């Protein structure tokens, strides 16, 4: 039995099966954009621990900052005593991504720190509810906001929450403005249709005066990397302003250089009232943030937010070092380059493969969708599973996305070299070609 087999066997014995396992991959150590399994086998990493490792695995400056902080202060709890790394990180965040102009009274933006994306989302909703005095929240099909009970209610995909109800009340879901380049209605048609639908929802589903927040991912992470049209998001902003609704942009997966900006919202000419951040912000340590307009954040009652570990000093030090490193490496520009390279290769695959439905994404957040005969209504879930398995056998780790798991997404560390990225994309292209050839034979032979 290999070490990997043994590790999986031990996992199955003691780890609750509810903790999803995408494959039998094991991981012993990692560096940059490379993973090494328990048997010493190397893989090119296109998953980045689900979008966490934009700055690369074990970046030496991030590791040094973690080591230094670990020897100084491991934990205090910000409720008990104020410590420098928490404050320095909040200062850095509000300076990096202001949500409102500063005034004579102070910064126009405030932040708070917690531990995970789901926790950031929970707190964002609590802030919006307190700031507006309203309870309803509007979210979207295909949205993913975490697995805790309120965040899980906001999450769309049923498989992530089977049997976990009752879910939180006062959550309303509308269709996400899905646009595919090669098929379906045009972007302008989708924008008009979905903004109309929201206006109708204010008449037939929930009164706008009862709505605390609309929460949206500008590029759906788990939902299949659909990119919200710019005009739609601008329309949302206008409707939120008209009705005093908080626009919450969930940047947990899109944030920190993934789309070529610190936040995807910077592509849209729109600023959220409240935003949520996690994943790549911590360079690999668990930390998340909620940011918001100071006038909104100041309406929250002391004691209603927080938690024992939120903004742990070591995680704050990691986040500060990660942001510095992203800045010094020009990771936003690098994300644009990686994204262009991935898009080019995906488009070649699309031109050669009947089963490709769409290639889409923003910056280095790129995906390719598969459907039987190229039909979006017939998701090629089994094919995608085969592609992922064969890629792994050939040394490339990729993961699926989409409600039907028929999309393959790239969340590779953005520090990946062109050579490694090309190598990974070549493995991917060869695998797609092999499996779609196989499936063509199967179809013609049946
Ligand atoms: C957009 C978005 N929001 C929230 C979450 C939940 O984050 P976490 O898994 O850290 O709770 C995720 C996780 O994938 C996400 O992609």
Image (tube, rainbow, N blue to C red):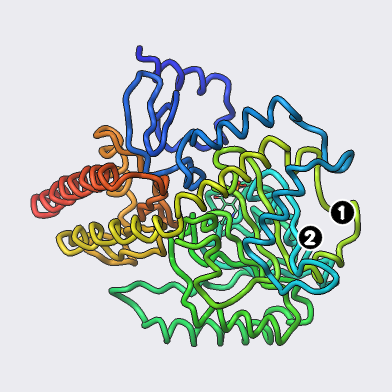
Looking at the image, is mark 1 or mark 2 earlier in the sequence? 2
* Label 2 CB less than 8 angstroms from ligand 1: no
Residue matched to label 2: 126
Circle 1 Cα neighbour tier, 10 Å, few/some/many (<14 / 14–19 / ≥20): few
Q: Horizontally, is 203 left or right of 365 in the view? A: right
Q: In the depicted view, which residue is nearer to us: 213 or 120?
A: 120
At a point 38% along the width and 53% down the height, the residue shown is: 409
Q: In this view, does 425 lie above or below 295?
A: above
Badge count: 2
CB atoms at circles 1 and 2 under 8 Å apart?
yes
Residue most toward the top? 1
Q: From what the image shows, is residue 325 above or below residue 367?
A: above
User: Under tag 1, what secondary structure?
Assistant: loop
Q: Mark 1 vs ligand 1: CB under 8 Å?
A: no
Q: Is residue 336 visible?
A: yes
What residue appears at the point 15 percent right and 45 percent down from the top-left corner? 434
Q: Where is residue 8 in the image (x, y as percent from the top left)?
A: 45, 22
| Image x and y of residue 324, in percent | 56, 48
Task: Please tell me the numbered disc located at residue 304.
Answer: 1
Q: How much space separates mark 1 and mark 2, taking CA atoms?
A: 8 Å
Could you tell whether 315 is left or right of 308 in the image? left
Q: Nearer the viewer, residue 154 or 327?
A: 327
Q: Is residue 274 left or right of residue 282?
A: right
What is the quadrant of the N terminus in the image? Answer: top left
- Residue 126 location, x and y as percent? 79, 60
Is residue 166 at all visible to an observer of this figure? no
Nearest the viewer among 118 and 183 is 118
Identify the residue at image location x=74%, y=28%: 72
Q: In which quarter of the image is residue 282?
A: top right
């Amino acid at each position: 039995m290999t070490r990997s087999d043994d590790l999986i066997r031990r996992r199955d014995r003691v780890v609750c099966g509810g903790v999803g396992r995408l494959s039998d991959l094991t991981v012993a150590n990692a560096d940059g954009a490379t993973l090494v399994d328990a048997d010493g086998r190397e893989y090119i990493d296109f998953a980045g621990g689900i979008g966490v490792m934009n700055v690369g695995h074990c970046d030496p400056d991030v590791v040094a900052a973690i080591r230094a902080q670990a020897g100084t202060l491991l934990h205090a709890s910000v409720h008990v005593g104020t410590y420098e790394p928490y404050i320095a990180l909040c200062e850095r965040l509000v300076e990096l991504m202001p949500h409102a102009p500063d005034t004579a009274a102070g910064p126009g933006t405030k932040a708070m720190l917690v531990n995970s994306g789901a926790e950031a989302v929970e707190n964002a909703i609590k802030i919006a509810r307190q700031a507006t005095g309203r309870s309803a929240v509007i979210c979207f099909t295909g949205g993913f906001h975490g697995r805790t009970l309120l965040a899980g209610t906001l999450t769309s995909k049923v498989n992530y929450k089977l049997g976990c109800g009752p879910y939180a009340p006062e959550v309303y879901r509308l269709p996400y403005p899905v646009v595919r380049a090669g098929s379906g209605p045009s972007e302008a048609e989708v924008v008009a249709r979905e903004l109309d639908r929201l206006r109708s929802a204010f008449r037939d589903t929930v009164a706008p005066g009862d709505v605390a927040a609309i929460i949206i991912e500008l590029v759906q992470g788990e939902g299949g990397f659909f990119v919200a049209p710019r005009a739609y998001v601008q329309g949302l902003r206008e409707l939120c302003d008209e009705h005093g609704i908080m626009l919450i942009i969930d940047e947990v997966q899109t944030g920190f250089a993934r789309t070529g900006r610190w936040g995807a919202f910077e592509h849209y000419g729109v600023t959220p009232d409240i935003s949520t951040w996690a994943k790549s912000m911590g360079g690999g340590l668990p930390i998340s943030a909620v940011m918001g307009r100071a006038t909104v954040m100041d309406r929250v009652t002391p004691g209603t937010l927080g938690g024992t570990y939120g903004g742990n000093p070591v995680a704050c030090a990691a986040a500060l070092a990660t942001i510095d490193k992203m800045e010094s490496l020009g990771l936003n520009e690098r994300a644009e380059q990686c994204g262009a390279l991935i898009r080019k290769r995906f488009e070649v695959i699309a031109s050669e493969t009947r089963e490709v439905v769409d290639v889409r994404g923003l910056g280095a957040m790129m995906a390719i969708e598969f459907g039987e005969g190229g039909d979006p209504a017939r998701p090629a879930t089994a094919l995608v599973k085969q592609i992922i398995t064969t890629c792994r056998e050939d040394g490339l780790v990729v993961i699926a996305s989409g409600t039907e798991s028929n999309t393959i997404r790239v969340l590779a560390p953005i520090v990946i070299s062109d050579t490694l990225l090309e190598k990974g994309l070549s493995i991917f292209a060869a695998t797609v070609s092999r499996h779609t050839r196989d499936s063509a034979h199967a179809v013609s032979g049946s």
